[in-house]
Image (cartoon, rainbow, N blue to C red):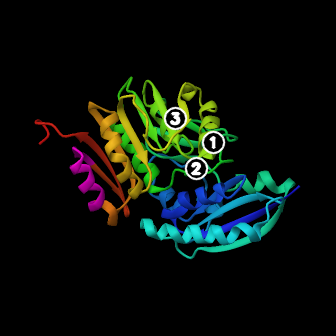
Amino acid sequence: MKWNQVSVLTTSEAVEAVSNILMESGANGVAIEDAMDVVNFESDAFGEILDVATFDHIKEGAKVIAYFPETIFLPEILPTVEARVLQLEEFGLNIGENKIETSEVVESDWATAWKKYYHPVNISRYLTIVPEWQDYTPHSTDEHVMKLDPGMAFGTGTHPTTRLTLQALEVVLRSGETVIDVGTGSGVLSIASKCLGAGEVYAYDLDEVAVASAKENMNLNPVAKDVIVAPNNLLVGIDKKADVIVANILADIIIELIPDAYRCLNEDGTFIISGIIEDKESAVLEVLYENGFVVDQRFQQKDWLAFILKKANEELI
């Protein structure tokens, strides 16, 4: 069987959104080649995990590579893909060149085409993302290894929003907390929550592809096999209470989520948000304050922000 490879030239900040568009358009899988992979590696303080000298990578921006079965007629879907990527600018994302390239890949090359883009990635001192087919030896007894199947769209871990969210979870989680992961995607935040000691974890996503991907990734990680993964539009209709609610999604979607997050959060609970480009900070904070949240901690990597928030009370005001 032949596969059609579609590559979208874009930016680091847009890779997750572009990946989601391609998956929704019928791709069987998405790989990400990001110049930031090497930048983050070179500044990483947690030990060498790949050979930079032999790591084949692009020097600028990012490329999202999607694989479509030959049964899908590309000329019919590519104009829609291009238009949807252009719309991302309305959410404040820099989409870069937005150039689309196509080529054929024979089935025998399928595994190789996938695997060259994926390597273990240290997110922090305690968390490492590893492709499910690779062997990896932790550097310390405190390091948690999260296995992910890159056959579905997911952040490689180099994207600032993913790193910031995971670092915030490390700060917040102690033991036994009930966590709700909104817009779970690959499920990486839910898996990390379990690794860091969370009790019950609920993972929701509107996208059925993401729900299927998250379920597969839970099964790859024994610690996360009891995570409840289900389709849902943000927290609409959810009536359970949580100690921690975490969302790594676009700023405009976070704004929609805020009232329900307040409703579902325990009085002494913690709300973690990421995916906020710096230009959107004031708009998001305005709605947070209006709905009774206060900022406990602020994280920043390049132009991306994450926040740890609490419900306002007399002690915090």
Residue 171 appears left or right of 235? left
Q: What amino acid type is highlighted by mark number 1?
A: Ser
Q: Are marks 2 and 3 in contact (CB under 8 Å)?
A: no
The one nearer the camera, 232 or 226, is: 232
- Find the residue positioned furthest to the front: 237
Give the secondary structure at mark 1: helix
| Label located before the other in sequence (2 or 1) | 2
Mark 1 Cα shell of 10 Å, populated few (<14), some (14-19), many (≥20): many
Does 49 sit left or right of 279 as displayed?
A: right
Q: Is residue 32 above or below residue 59?
A: above
Residue at mark 2 = 154
Q: Marks 2 and 3, how far apart in space?
A: 13 Å
Left or right: residue 70 versus residue 291 is right
First to last magenta residue range: 282-297
Mark 1–mark 3 Cα distance, whole angstroms, equals: 13 Å
* Circle 2 or circle 1, nearest the eye: 1
- For label 3, the SS is helix
Is 184 above or below relative to 287?
above
Q: Residue at point 75% right, 64% down?
A: 5
Specify the quadrant that holds the N terminus. Answer: bottom right
Q: Residue 300, percent across and down?
A: 33, 56
At label 3, which amino acid type do we have?
A: Ile
Q: Which residue is mark 1?
A: 213
Tag 3 residue: 191
Q: Amino acid at mark 2?
A: Phe
Please say if 293 is above or below 113. above
Quarter of the view holding residue 102: bottom right
Residue at image position (40%, 49%) is 164
Query: Given contact means CB atoms under 8 Å apart, are the residues at marks 2 and 1 in contact?
Result: yes
Find residue 267 and report its horizontal and vertical position in percent: 25, 31
Please say whether residue 181 is one of the residues in the magenta stretch.
Answer: no
Residue 71 spot, x, y in % from top left: 83, 58
